[in-house]
Amino acid sequence: MQPVVIIALVLHVVSGVFWAGSTFALARMGGNQARGFLRPQLGAAATAIVTGALLWYLLHRGSEGTSEHVLATGAIFALLAAGAQALTGLTGRQAVDQVLAGVVELDATPGQNRALIGQRVAAGCLLVTVICMAAARYV
């Protein structure tokens, strides 16, 4: 089982680092190039989520301590981050405009505005996720 855990852990960390890092960078850069990063980010998100679920199954199944609660909170925020990025990057203009009704224009084009909002929401969620993963072992 140890090789499976090691491979899953490496894939989880590498995909998570790319996902969070690119999200933080795009949120800081005003959403520029967000459309070009959408597929790689969602691929990294899917890899991080699937390998995280596998690690949970292998290492935390049946446990219900404070550490697992903190990790579960991080997992929920990771799912919210992926949802925010997918919603603002993949759906049609009307659906997103309804969800984001009342949001002030941040950039020149509505597509960039949606991408920027999605990246910023996802960045906040991923920050909580990273904090939860880092703290889970010590709580």
Image (spheres, rainbow, N blue to C red):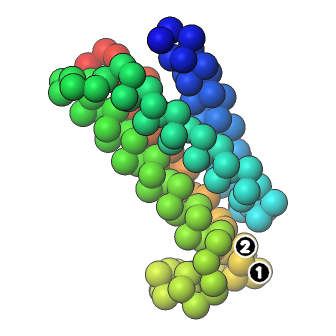
The residue sitting at 21% across, 25% down in the picture is 62
Can the viewer see residue 20? Answer: no
Image spot of residue 6 (x, y percent)? 56, 14
Point out which mark residue 61 bears.
none
Can the viewer see residue 98? Answer: yes
In the shown orientation, is residue 139 left or right of residue 122? left
Q: Nearer the viewer, residue 131 or 29?
A: 131
In the shown orientation, is residue 121 left or right of residue 66? right
The residue sitting at 32% across, 41% down in the picture is 73
Image spot of residue 9 (x, y percent)? 55, 21
- Image height of 125 relative to 86, above or below: above
Q: Nearer the viewer, residue 23 or 64?
A: 64
Considering every residue shown, the one lying at the far front of the view is 1
The residue sitting at 47% across, 81% down in the picture is 99
Residue kind at label 1, given as amino acid type: Ala
- Image height of 115 relative to 99, above or below: above
For disc 2, the neighbor class at 10 Å (few under 14, some 14 to 19, many from 20) is many
Q: Nearer the viewer, residue 125 or 12?
A: 12
- Image height of 63 relative to 113, above or below: above
Q: Do labels 2 and 1 touch, CB within 8 Å?
A: yes
Considering every residue shown, the one lying at the far bottom of the view is 94
For disc 1, the neighbor class at 10 Å (few under 14, some 14 to 19, many from 20) is few
In the shown orientation, is residue 81 left or right of residue 71? right
Pointer 2 residue: 112
The residue sitting at 45% across, 31% down in the picture is 54
Secondary structure beneath disc 2?
Answer: helix
Q: Quadrant of residue 67?
A: top left
Image spot of residue 32 (x, y percent)? 79, 62
Point out which mark residue 108 bears.
1
Residue kind at label 2, given as amino acid type: Gln
